[in-house]
Image: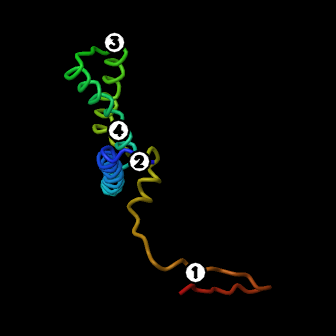
Amino acid sequence: LFTDRQSFLPVLLVILWYIASLVGYYVFESIFLKKSDATLLNLSLQTSNFWAVIFSIVVFQEKPGPQFYVAVSMVIAGVICYELCGNSPSHPEEARMELLPTTSQSPPSVFTDGYKSIEKTNG
């Protein structure tokens, strides 16, 4: 695979940097998802093209087409709308369910046996 000894170290360093970048991304993504939600993560990741185009403008002096500016403005507007409105549930029942405390015990089960009912508690 690596017949040239001079290219072995740079290639190995690039591979190790790639692995470290992926590990860091997934660790920070899971931390972000604990504090926020996936919609905001996806909207934020869509702005990565914006930074790539800024890099190409600064380094290579390339100008993007007008479609890029329309797309970036739509993504930024989506992030702003999401931040202003949030992700409140559309049904009041869902909001009420989020406020209910969770219990570790399951509710009792009721079985019918002929003419009488037998209540069995799980616990």
Q: Earlier in the sequence, mark 2 or mark 4?
A: 2
Q: On the picture, is 56 further left or further right than 118?
A: left
Residue type beneath disc 1: Pro
Q: Which residue is mark 4?
A: 45
Residue type beneath disc 3: Pro
Q: Earlier in the sequence, mark 3 or mark 4?
A: 4
Please provide percent x and percent y for residue 96: 42, 57
Q: CA distance from mark 2 to mark 4?
A: 35 Å
Q: Residue at x 57, y 84 (%)?
A: 122
Q: Residues within 10 Å of mark 2 (few under 14, many from 20)?
A: few
Q: Nearer the viewer, mark 2 or mark 1?
A: 2
Question: Up-down: is 56 above or below 37?
Answer: above
Q: CA distance from mark 2 to mark 1?
A: 66 Å
Label number found at residue 2 = 2
Q: CA distance from mark 1 to mark 4?
A: 46 Å
Q: Which residue is mark 1?
A: 108
Label number found at residue 66 = 3
Q: CA distance from mark 3 to mark 2?
A: 44 Å
Q: Nearer the viewer, mark 3 or mark 2?
A: 2
Q: Residues within 10 Å of mark 1 (few under 14, many from 20)?
A: few
